[in-house]
Image: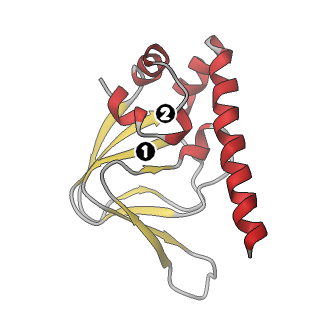
């Protein structure tokens, strides 16, 4: 049901339709009213969010004596929190709905169950992450 939304996630770009279906079975749709937080900076990452409708603001507090800084926005088709699927680090920013927003959420615990049943998925995901890392290192080398 949510395979099309998951197909847009670069982390899943190398997966087959069957693999996407397996992962999509645990996806859930959630609705947020304007001003509601999808998650907060410092929270434990519980999964990946794909915005399917609406718009969110991404804010980060870097200094406790200053206000949060808006570091970006996201809208339909954009993905937030995908690294939470792979690491257990706290959220690096807060995400707040600017308007009525709908998101498809892939919970970390369900995703990890699928990975344990199909370890070849982990290899495909490692390949995608490796390409991302090389690209990021290339950008850093340019500066």
Q: Position of residue 69 (x, y in %)?
A: 50, 79
- Seen at 39% across and 51% down, the residue is 78
Which quarter of the image is occupied by the N terminus?
A: top left
In this image, 131 relative to 26: left or right?
right
Q: Is residue 112 above or below residue 63?
A: above
Quick one: 121 or 30, which is closer to the camera? Answer: 121
In this image, 143 relative to 94: left or right?
right
Residue placed under numbered mark 1 in the picture:
49
The answer for how far apart the CA atoms under marks 2 and 1 are is 9 Å
- Seen at 44% across and 70% down, the residue is 72
Q: Position of residue 100 (x, y in %)?
A: 21, 57
Does residue 62 appear anywhere in the picture? yes
Which color scheme does this rendered protein use? secondary structure
- Seen at 24% across and 56% down, the residue is 54
Q: Position of residue 121 (x, y in %)?
A: 62, 21
Which of the 4 image quadrants contains residue 109? top right
User: Which mark sits nearer the N-terminus, 2 or 1?
Assistant: 1
Q: Position of residue 85 (x, y in %)?
A: 59, 38
Quick one: 140 or 72, which is closer to the camera? Answer: 140
Give the foreground label among 2 and 1: 1
- Residue that sits furthest to the bottom in the current view: 65
Residue 128, labelled with which disc?
none
Q: Secondary structure at mark 1?
A: strand
Q: Are marks 2 and 1 in contact (CB under 8 Å)?
A: no
Which of the 4 image quadrants contains residue 106? top left
Residue placed under numbered mark 2 in the picture:
107
Q: Is residue 82 above or below residue 126?
A: below
Which quarter of the image is occupied by the C terminus?
A: bottom right
């Amino acid at each position: 049901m949510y395979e099309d939304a998951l197909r847009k996630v670069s982390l899943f770009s190398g997966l087959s339709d069957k693999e996407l279906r397996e992962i999509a079975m645990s996806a859930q749709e959630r609705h947020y009213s304007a001003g509601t937080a999808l998650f907060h900076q410092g929270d434990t990452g519980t999964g990946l969010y794909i915005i399917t409708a609406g718009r969110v603001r991404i804010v980060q507090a870097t200094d406790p004596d200053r206000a949060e800084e808006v570091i970006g926005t996201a809208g339909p088709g954009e993905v937030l929190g995908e690294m939470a699927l792979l690491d257990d680090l706290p959220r690096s920013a807060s995400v707040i709905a600017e308007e009525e927003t709908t998101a498809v959420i892939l919970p970390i615990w369900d995703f990890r169950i699928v990975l344990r049943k199909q370890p070849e998925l982990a290899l495909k995901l490692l390949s995608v992450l490796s390409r991302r890392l090389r690209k990021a290192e290339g950008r850093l080398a340019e500066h």
